[in-house]
Amino acid sequence: VQLQASGGGLVQAGGSLRLSCTASRTIHSSVVMGWYRQAPGKERELVATLRSGRDANYGDSVSGRFTIFRDNAKNSVYLQMRDLKAEDTAVYYCYAKLDGAAYWGQGTLVTVSS
């Protein structure tokens, strides 16, 4: 499966942005999908994951500001980001776990100017 992410860009601190990720084929709603990010010089970290029927899982640094949601009919997962901070600057990667294997999108750059 291929994951196509979009929606990154340059935004001012305090602003909002929505990321989108669409899978190249049907993804069952029970499959975990979500987002990770990697800032320059840092390790990749969890942003948010979601599996239908379960609560979303958020990284500590984004909880309360970011919301993950899915449109299973479109095989898509979204990340609504609010109150963005300079430290949110990173490449954001779409993620799906299928049959025990991790799949990653190509990454979309989010830059937050302070």
Image (cartoon, rainbow, N blue to C red):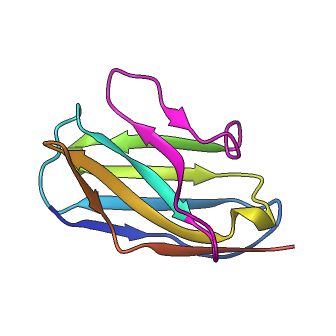
Q: Give the x, y percent position of residue 113.
A: 80, 76
- Which residue is rendered at x = 48% and y = 74% of the image? 108
Location of residue 24 with respect to 32 vertically, above or below: below
Q: How many marks?
A: 0
Residue 19 drawn in magenta: no
Q: Give the x, y percent position of residue 48.
A: 51, 44
Residue 57 drawn in magenta: yes
Location of residue 4 with respect to 50 vertically, above or below: below
- Which residue is rendered at x = 48% and y = 31% of the image? 56
Location of residue 26 with respect to 38 vertically, above or below: above
- Which residue is rendered at x = 23% and y = 34% of the image? 29
Q: Is residue 49 left or right of residue 90?
A: left
Residue range in magenta is 38-65
Quarter assignment of residue 66 = top right
Residues 98 and 112: in front is 98
Location of residue 44 with respect to 27 vertically, above or below: below
Q: Is residue 69 left or right of residue 61?
A: left
Residues 75 and 50: in front is 50
Q: Is residue 25 left or right of residue 58?
A: left
Quarter assignment of residue 86 = bottom right
Residues 14 and 63: in front is 63
Q: Give the x, y percent position of residue 44.
A: 52, 61
Quarter assignment of residue 14 = bottom right
Quarter of the image with the N terminus in it: bottom left
Task: Identify the main secondary structure in magenta.
Answer: loop
Quarter of the image with the C terminus in it: bottom right
- Which residue is rendered at x = 22% and y = 43% of the image? 73
